[in-house]
Image (spheres, rainbow, N blue to C red):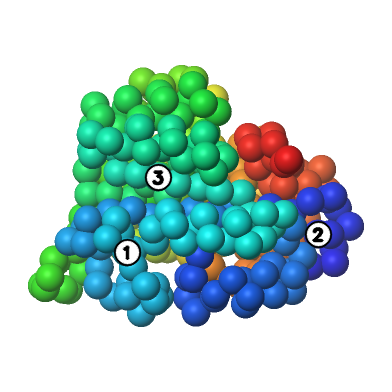
């Protein structure tokens, strides 16, 4: 923590949620202070009740009518600690009022990030494309979660919970909206760091990276695409093959964002141990996020 603090003037967690995994506001800020995090992008997750695993209720104490992590909870954090949180909101783009609701939230409450989008739809849905372009016009980066459909061993209430339809619908959306900044996130995104078929078999692939994965290809092709390193999926993608991870990070150091989606320090402990240049770590820990969403 102190090493990273010496290397950057600001550390930003670019992906987290209110009241997430037993962390209310007080405990959340204590956790940020413990790990030297200056600001957090605080994100909603709005989705119909039948589109998310009810097991999430163990991590979310009070889901709302609009989904497991309502915008109102994010707003409450920002209103109580405006110097620590940057407000995110992602209304379901399939709803006809979604752009109007987002516009009102930008105008009234200062929403600065569209996230987290985590829905059972193809991410190149035409209504979603319209939303992404709106976000591009208003300077909001778009954070998407991708999960594949495969056998989880469950049968009820759904055999699995897929989001986004895979990497190719997302790639089409990124190409269709060149003026919008996208951040890829989740098992179905980070599995594609490697050119193998594990993405369709398990959430956390194993073994050395096979060069030629879709994520590096898309990062080279699409300058508006960035990587959200949060959660087990982002960390696992790097830890599978540390030698590959160093080269990957160096190549894309201007478009990778430190983020947690949890409350431990595992990402920083791993990144600090790779021997990366200090300037690279400064970019990942805060400068890239502050470039996309300038700190006010």
Indicate which disc residue 90 carries.
Answer: 3
Label 3: element kind: loop
User: Which label belongs to residue 4?
Assistant: 2
Q: What residue lies at 27% left-to-right and 49% top-to-bottom? A: 119
* Contact (Cβ within 8 Å) of mark 3 with mark 1: no
Q: Secondary structure at mark 2?
A: helix
> Residue 96's quadrant in the figure?
top left
Residue 245 appearing in the image? no
Q: Earlier in the sequence, mark 2 or mark 1?
A: 2
Q: CA distance from mark 2 to mark 1?
A: 37 Å
Foreground: disc 3 or disc 1:
1
Q: Is residue 280 above or below residue 21?
A: above
Distance in Å between CA atoms under marks 2 and 3: 31 Å
Q: Position of residue 144 (x, y in %)?
A: 40, 44
Looking at this view, is 100 or 7 the one in front?
A: 100
Which residue is at the far front?
108
């Amino acid at each position: 923590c102190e090493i990273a603090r010496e290397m950057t003037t600001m550390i930003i967690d670019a992906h987290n949620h209110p009241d997430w995994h037993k962390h209310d506001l007080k405990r959340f800020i204590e956790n940020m202070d413990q790990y030297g995090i200056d600001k957090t992008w605080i994100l909603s997750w709005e989705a119909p009740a039948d589109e998310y695993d009810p097991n999430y209720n163990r991590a979310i104490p009070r889901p709302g009518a609009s989904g497991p992590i309502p915008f109102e909870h994010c707003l409450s954090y920002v209103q109580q600690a405006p110097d620590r949180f940057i407000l995110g909101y992602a209304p379901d783009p399939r709803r006809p009022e979604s752009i109007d609701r987002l516009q009102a939230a930008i105008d009234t409450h200062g929403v600065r990030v569209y996230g987290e989008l985590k829905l059972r739809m193809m991410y190149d849905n035409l209504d979603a494309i319209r939303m992404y372009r709106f976000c591009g016009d208003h300077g909001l980066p778009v954070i998407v979660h991708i999960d594949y459909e495969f056998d989880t061993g469950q049968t009820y209430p759904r055999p699995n919970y897929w989001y986004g339809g895979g990497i190719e619908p997302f790639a089409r959306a990124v190409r269709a909206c060149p003026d919008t900044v996208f951040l890829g996130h989740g098992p179905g995104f980070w599995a594609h760091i490697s050119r193998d078929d594990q993405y369709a078999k398990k959430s956390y692939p194993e073994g050395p990276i096979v060069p030629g994965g879709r994520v590096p290809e898309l990062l080279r092709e699409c300058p508006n695409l960035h990587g959200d390193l949060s959660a087990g999926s982002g960390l696992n993608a790097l830890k599978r093959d540390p030698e590959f991870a160093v080269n990957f990070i160096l190549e894309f150091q201007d478009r990778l964002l430190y983020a947690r989606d949890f409350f431990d320090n595992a990402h920083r402990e791993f990144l600090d141990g790779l021997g990366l240049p200090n300037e690279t770590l400064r970019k990942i820990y805060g400068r890239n996020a502050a470039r996309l969403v300038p700190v006010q």
